[in-house]
Image (cartoon, rainbow, N blue to C red):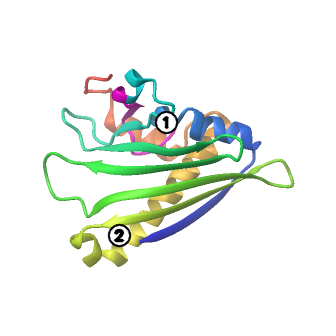
Amino acid sequence: MKLNRTVIINKPVNKVWQVAAEDFANAYKWMTGVVHSYETPAAKQAGDALPGRICYLENKENPFHAVENILSFDADNHRLEFEIFPVKTSGGDIPIIKNHVVMQFKSTQDGGTRVYWDCNVELKLLGKILYPLLKLGLNKGFDGILNDLKVYVETGQVSAKKKKFDKKIGPLKIATV
């Protein structure tokens, strides 16, 4: 399932790139739905230039999480490519195998940044059956991520939705790396 989203952020491309790409491992600081995130330990130990991140999506031991591997990091052209693999050890099945994302950051004439989110979500059979609902939900989710990024970069504060999420989950209950 191919999905494309875009947002205009009223800050220079270098500022947006810094938050979304250079500080990739710290998405939990601004992204709704992410309880905690960190650079993948194996990549950090190997000194890998393209480390990736782990994003906890629940606030409990052995949480539902996403493993996100950077495939391409092009700072000169402000292009970031990564794959997301959902990992759930208990509960219901996830209808997604992986999500391949390309983010491109382009300067606008007025000094802002247009962010493009182009992805290809690989679905399991359940996902193919749920395609129309899944497409609506994913589009809403990706729009939310881009809005969270916009608010954080423009104001230095998290979005109202992220504030509400953080308040709801409470203090971190899981061990962090």
Left of 143 or right of it: where is 92?
Answer: left
- Quadrant of the snapshot with the C terminus: top left
Residue drawn at point x = 15 percent, y = 57 percent: 92
Q: Tell which of 135 and 25 is nearer to you.
A: 25
Q: Quick check: is 61 in the magenta stretch?
A: no
Left of 173 or right of it: where is 37?
Answer: right
Residue drawn at point x = 53 percent, y = 59 percent: 143
Residue drawn at point x = 53 percent, y = 50 percent: 81
> Which region is colored magenta?
29-42
**Mark 2 burial class by Cα count in 10 Å: few <14, some 14-19, many 20+:** some
The residue to which callout 2 is attached is: 134
The mark that comes first in sequence, 1 or 2, is 1
Q: CA distance from mark 1 to mark 2?
A: 30 Å
In this rendering, is residue 135 above or below 175? Answer: below
The residue to which callout 1 is attached is: 50
Mark 2 belongs to which amino acid? Leu
x, y (%) of residue 130?
28, 75
